[in-house]
């Protein structure tokens, strides 16, 4: 599965070119991005795809010295469950 970067999002497409999973964000200011929503097609659920998308967003934040404000319910829960995001979680 290849995660691609688009305009303020990371996503996965199927073989037909349809977007089947994504995590979207928007720039809040120079050093904060807001994780708006996460979507995973039912055919991919239970495979850790949402976490892989969040991992890629966190990697992007680290590369650009950004903090992430979780608005999306999935990201809120993941930030509570996994300490690996502590360095990019908004303080």
Image (cartoon, rainbow, N blue to C red):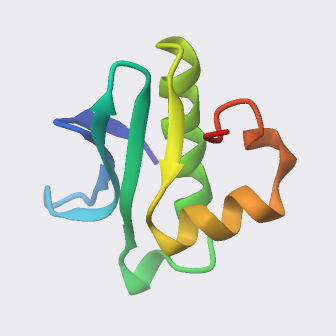
Q: Position of residue 39 (x, y in %)?
A: 36, 70
- Give the answer, above or below, for where 16 lies relative to 32: below
Judged left or right of residue 87, residue 34 is: left
Residue found 50% across the figure and 48% down from its top = 69
Q: Quadrant of residue 22?
A: bottom left
Residue 53 visible within the image: no
Relative to 37, say whether 35 is above or below: above
Q: How many marks?
A: 0
Q: Is residue 37 above or below residue 70?
A: below
Q: State the image coordinates of residue 18 (x, y, percent, origin top left).
A: 15, 63
Q: Quadrant of the C terminus?
A: top right
Residue 80 seen in this snapshot = yes
Which residue is the extreme one toward the right? 83
The residue closer to the viewer here, 9 or 42, is 9
The residue under the point 28% across, 34% down is 27
In the image, residue 73 above or below residue 9: below
- Quarter where residue 84 is shown: top right
Q: Nearer the viewer, residue 51 or 2?
A: 51
Residue at the outermost bottom position: 42
- In the visual, does 68 lie left or right of 11? right
Relative to the observer, which residue lies in front, 16 or 67? 67
Please, which residue is most extreme toward the top here? 64
| Left or right of residue 64, residue 58 in this image | right
Image coordinates of residue 11 in percent, x first then y, are 32, 49
Q: Residue at x 43, y 31 (%)?
A: 32
Q: Residue at x 50, y 23 (%)?
A: 66
Q: Position of residue 21 (x, y in %)?
A: 35, 63
């Amino acid at each position: 599965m290849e995660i691609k970067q688009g305009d303020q999002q990371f996503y996965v497409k199927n073989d037909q070119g349809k977007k089947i999973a994504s995590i979207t964000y928007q720039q809040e200011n120079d050093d904060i991005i807001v994780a708006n929503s996460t979507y995973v097609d039912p055919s991919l659920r239970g495979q850790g795809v949402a976490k892989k998308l969040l991992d890629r967003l966190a990697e992007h934040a680290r590369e650009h010295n950004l903090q992430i404000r979780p608005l999306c319910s999935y990201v809120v829960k993941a930030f509570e469950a996994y300490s690996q995001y502590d360095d990019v979680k908004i303080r």
